[in-house]
Image (cartoon, grey):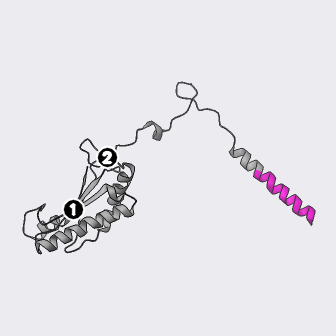
Amino acid sequence: MFKERLTSLIAIALVGLVLTGCAGKKTPPATTDDGNTGAATTPAEAAPAPADFGADGQPIDPRTGGPLNRTFYFDYDKSDINPSDIAVLEIHAQLLNRNTGKSVVIEGHCDERGTREYNLALGERRANAIKSFLTAAGVSASQIESVSYGEERPENPGHDDSAWSKNRRAIATYR
């Protein structure tokens, strides 16, 4: 019985040595197109990483290479982030986490309905909802400022549902 266990342990040890020995083998250096040996570059290494921010200082969407959406719309009398905005907010968080020297101001806005005081408070809740999402995603609170403009800066000056839906928003402005 002891001899069978010892044989089994030796067999397991040999298999382990063979497997780890194979993993440690070095491969010969790769050759380049001109026949020289050296470190091979993969396409990912050869291409520079895309810029996080454009010349205007605003974020670039890594998925498209165009401007990253910075406006987030809200339902009437709500400050809940729309699920459709989560992916874009995650990109904003990644950009801010990679670029700790950058900061962002989140502006909260409302439509014209409601009192001035109520709309200022609602705009603040909207801005803080975006700020809370970003901080929960690891962005330093010192990189984020929130401000409410209430109904004072409408995107659309109209007085109907279409205009009001454009005015219920939060905007991320980078500095």
Query: Residue 91 shows which numbered tag?
Result: none
Mark 2 residue element = loop
Question: Label 1 is placed on what type of residue?
Answer: Val
Q: Is residue 105 left or right of residue 142?
A: left
Name the spot of residue 112 as percent of width and height, x first. 10, 70
The stretch in magenta equals 1-16
Instruction: Of the two numbered discs 2 and 1 on the same chain, state the one appearing first in sequence.
Output: 2
The picture quadrant where one finds residue 132 is bottom left
Question: Label 2 is placed on what type of residue?
Answer: Gly
Which residue in the protein does label 2 denote?
A: 65
Name the spot of residue 90 as percent of width and height, x first. 36, 59
In the rendered image, residue 127 lying in the magenta stretch gets the answer no
Mark 1 residue element = strand
Q: Is residue 56 left or right of residue 9?
A: left
Name the spot of residue 102 as percent of width and height, x first. 31, 49
Q: Quadrant of the N terminus?
A: bottom right
Determine the main secondary structure of the stretch shown in magenta: helix
Between 143 and 174, the one lying in front of the other is 143
Between 154 and 37, the one lying in front of the other is 154
Residue 166 in view (yes/no)? yes
In the rendered image, residue 12 lying in the magenta stretch gets the answer yes
Name the spot of residue 86 as percent of width and height, x first. 34, 63
Between 27 and 101, the one lying in front of the other is 101
Which residue in the protein does label 1 denote?
A: 147
Q: How far apart are marks 2 and 1 (CA)?
A: 29 Å
User: What residue do we see at 26% from left, 45% from top?
Assistant: 57
